[in-house]
Image (cartoon, rainbow, N blue to C red):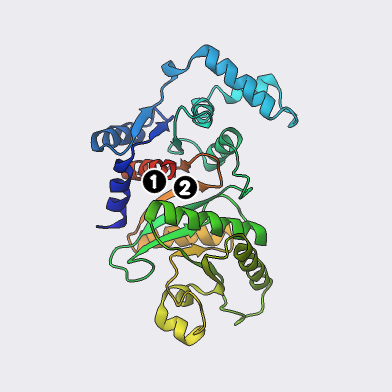
Amino acid sequence: MDAIEKIRQRAKKDLKSIVLPEFDDKRVVEAARIIKAEGLAKITLFTPDMVEKKEKERYIREYLELYQNKDIDQAAVEKLFEDILYYAAMMTREGKFDGLVAGASHTTPDVVRASMRCLGIDSRITIISSCFIMDVPDCPYGDQGTFVFADCGVIPEPNARQLSCIAFSAAELAKKVLDLEPRIAFLSYSTKGSARAKSAEKIAEALALLKEMAPELSADGEMQVDAAIVPEVTKIKYPDSPIGGNANVLIFPNLEAGNIGYKLTQRLAKARAIGPLLLGLNKPASDLSRGCLVEDVVDCAAVTAIRAQ
């Protein structure tokens, strides 16, 4: 059973309610039909006629109270709530839905902003980031071709603390959704000082911070990707590595590398890429690519449902 099938089977075991607010996107409409037919989640394709006036007014008041110190006025909030993404996110915040999936017709900043402001940030982690579940066919690396890549969608130039939080969040997702024991590699263009760079110092600090947060996690860095995932290369370049060339959670040094890395893997290796899955929120949410396929919406909804279990 491949990773995608495992995800769908796990989603079916404990159905959670997921909201899709992009009611006018044909891909999302078809995905909602499939999710319902396959029993992956209690799915709601949220349409404008479902908006209740009094509830919307209450959400606007609550939002204003949350951000009263952010120099935002009533008119600006009312304009935000013209988009039902915010209404659906506030419903998710108060537990009327267990998770949110959007992004087919919204930009990443739109979805991240609504999710951050309405769902809130996990106080343990303090930042929002994102990851992809990558399912690479006919691949012996990772966990038989299954990886988590992070951050590929949110933080352009993470500092050491942010890198450690990204790794912690991605490891949690690997455990929760894929039932994998995470083996984390902080990636670089050098392996344990093979090149002198400030990035190596940053990664060393991130690794130390991660060990403070979660000493039980298996993690290492800085590492070139071949030293991280190919045991034969690890034996040559870094024989003492605690992950032994078996990394399944890959932490990229910045957003450029992460985004390029996942898209290269997706296109050249014909991998399935599930995400971006938003990390660090109080409730699970996924930010679809605007170029997503119907199956991408289905898979993101299934993952979001598992995260809510």
Residue 116 lies, in percent from the top left, at 59, 38
| Residue displayed at 73% across by 27% down | 68
| Residue displayed at 58% across by 47% down | 128
Q: What quarter of the picture does the C terminus occupy?
A: top left
Is residue 159 visible in this depiction of the protein?
A: no
Mark 2: which amino acid?
Leu
- Give the Cα separation between the discs numbered 1 and 2: 8 Å
Relative to residue 221, is residue 3 drawn left or right?
left
Per the image, the residue denoted by label 1 is 303
Give the residue furthest to the front: 216
Q: Nearer the viewer, residue 96 or 129?
A: 96
Residue 242 lies, in percent from the top left, at 50, 76
Q: Which mark is residue 121?
A: none
Relative to residue 308, is residue 67 drawn left or right?
right
1 and 2 marks in contact (CB < 8 Å): yes
Q: Which quadrant would residue 148 be assigned to in this image?
A: bottom left
Mark 1: which amino acid?
Val
Residue 284 lies, in percent from the top left, at 48, 41
Relative to residue 205, is residue 102 drawn left or right?
left
Give the residue furthest to the bottom: 236
Per the image, the residue denoted by label 2 is 277
Query: Tag 2 or tag 1, which sits nearer the N-term?
Result: 2
Relative to residue 217, is residue 265 drawn left or right?
left
Label 1: element kind:
helix
- Residue 118 against residue 159 in the figure, above or below: above
| Residue displayed at 51% across by 59% down | 258
Label 2: element kind:
strand
